[in-house]
Amino acid sequence: MRSPWFQRVTAGSATGALAREVDWAATPLGVPGTWPTALRLTVEMCFSTRFPVLVTWGPELTMIYNDGYREMLGSEKHPGAMGAPLAEVWKEVWDDLLPSVEAVMVRGEPTWEIDRHLVTNRSGYDEDVYFTYSYSPIRDSSDQVGGLLDIVTETTERVVEQRRMRLLGELSAALSTVRDDLDALASATLGLLGDAEDVLAAALYVRDRDGALLLRGSAGASRGADVPDEVVERVARTGAAEDRGRTVVVPLAGVAGGTPVGVMVLTGAGRRPWDEAYRSYLLLVASIVGAAVGRTVRHQTEVEHLREVSDTLQAAILPEGSSLVGVVARYRPAAGDLAVGGDWYDVVELGPGRRALVVGDCVGHGLDAAARMGQLRAATRALLLEDRSPADVLDGLDRFARTLPGAECTTVFCAVVDEVEHAVVHSSAGHLPPVLRRAAGGAELLVGGRGAALGISTAPRPEAVERLSDGDLLVVCTDGLIERRQESLRVGLDRLVAEVASQPAGAPTASVADDLLRALTPRGGQDDVALVVYRAGAVADDDGR
């Protein structure tokens, strides 16, 4: 006979329906109609909340759980876990759980674990997972402990993301101090990667002065050496990354458009699912190492003048200008010896009709600012290629900036243009507002989606959406274009809006960019200038270069 109270409390959820199908008479609990009051009340609480809850009762700690907890069981433990003994369901981690279970069941003491690491086999493979949970005693009418209540949340994604961002920060910090010693760079890189939980194996190849590709070192399991030499040589020759299972073979960029200076082989550890986020993380690791290798190689080859080195570094870190129709990018260094600084731009193709526009400004200029800028730009591109929204990209950069010395207070504007939807979604981390000039006339500042500069606030980033019409111009720049000594920024912004509004209708995008630079760049300016101009609905004959 079905128990009315059990029918009531299990109604309305998938796990509740499963619980009603269990032959409880065949378990130590017996039929629900015979369950003690304490167990009934706890089960009712379990099925009345969406928070993950597990109830166990009796000599075998028989399991009853809700929809939230079902996610903890992976693809293979559910539905068999319902009505099964706790020790049987979680047998692979039982030795880890037993001390906490005994604390509750034997001594009646509640327990509390934060980000507890377990190696489970819940989906057919060993998997690193993390949980924050509390075990509490459930007492019967005689005040004896009859069961265990588990309130739990899985923290795996957060822990893994923090761990990966921490490694990126440590890697960036370690490599930022290496300027002219490839052996020291390889040692620092492989030392960190050899201890990294998400990297099973790593190998670093760098070209020597004669162009030969040499193994500078390796770390971790031998699987990293399983990549044939011809694959490494091909990646170095073509500049195109290749995937081999959980291993990525990545070219390390040198001078923009030139032959890669090396190759990084990275193998993902086997106890996390291999997905696009994991792959993108390894590509970001390789990007940071590549930036450091490129910088070091350039320092080693400096023989005449610092400008030659700085010009090479500038070409490696910033693109020469967008090759995409309707997008023009320009960069002008601050006056002085170095043609490199902390301002940057990027234009990222995200798929048919979608592209990202990014402009950023690190504090300072010169090689130190350029090093930070290169790491931030690489991180931004990697986050965008994960198909994140502009606000999510800036949230990720916030976390990265807190691990990168000197990156605090960097300003970034990030926008994703969708030419099919005729819209731009944008978010700003303390950056100058862009100017939108309508094809029908008039120009305005886009002040929506604004937040603090990187590393200052932990609040979620806002986002704004603006509809676009064919011919509309979007102009994004760094403050070096408009700032003047002893003049308020508001005056400079007004001057920018007026200059954009005065551009002739239908003028080529490249002409607009060049005219803005000529009209607005201060003479003898002490700050770098980055400028991106986008025209909605542009056609191929609007030559942006």
Image (spheres, rainbow, N blue to C red):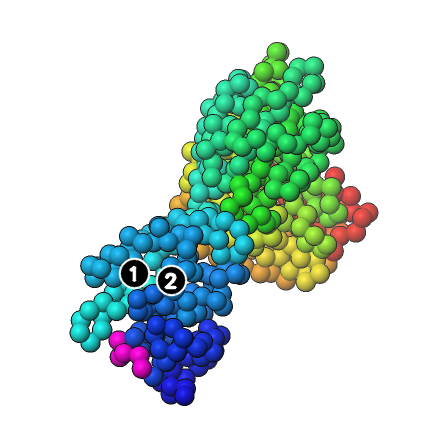
Q: Residue at x 42, y 44 (%)?
A: 455
Between 270 and 290, the one lying in front of the other is 270
At a point 51% along the width and 46% down the height, the residue shown is: 271
Q: Is residue 81 visible?
A: yes
Rendered image quadrant of residue 279: top right
- Residue picked out by circle 1: 135
Is 534 within the magenta?
no
> What percent of the width, then of the height, locates residue 332?
61, 32
Q: Residue furthest front?
A: 26
Kindly identify which residue carries mark 2. 86
Q: Residue at x 37, y 54 (%)?
A: 94
Q: Position of residue 499 (x, y in %)?
A: 63, 47
- Specify the segment rendered in magenta: 34-38
Where 387 falls versus 32 (above or below)?
Answer: above
131 sits left or right of 539 in the view: left
3 above or below 98? below
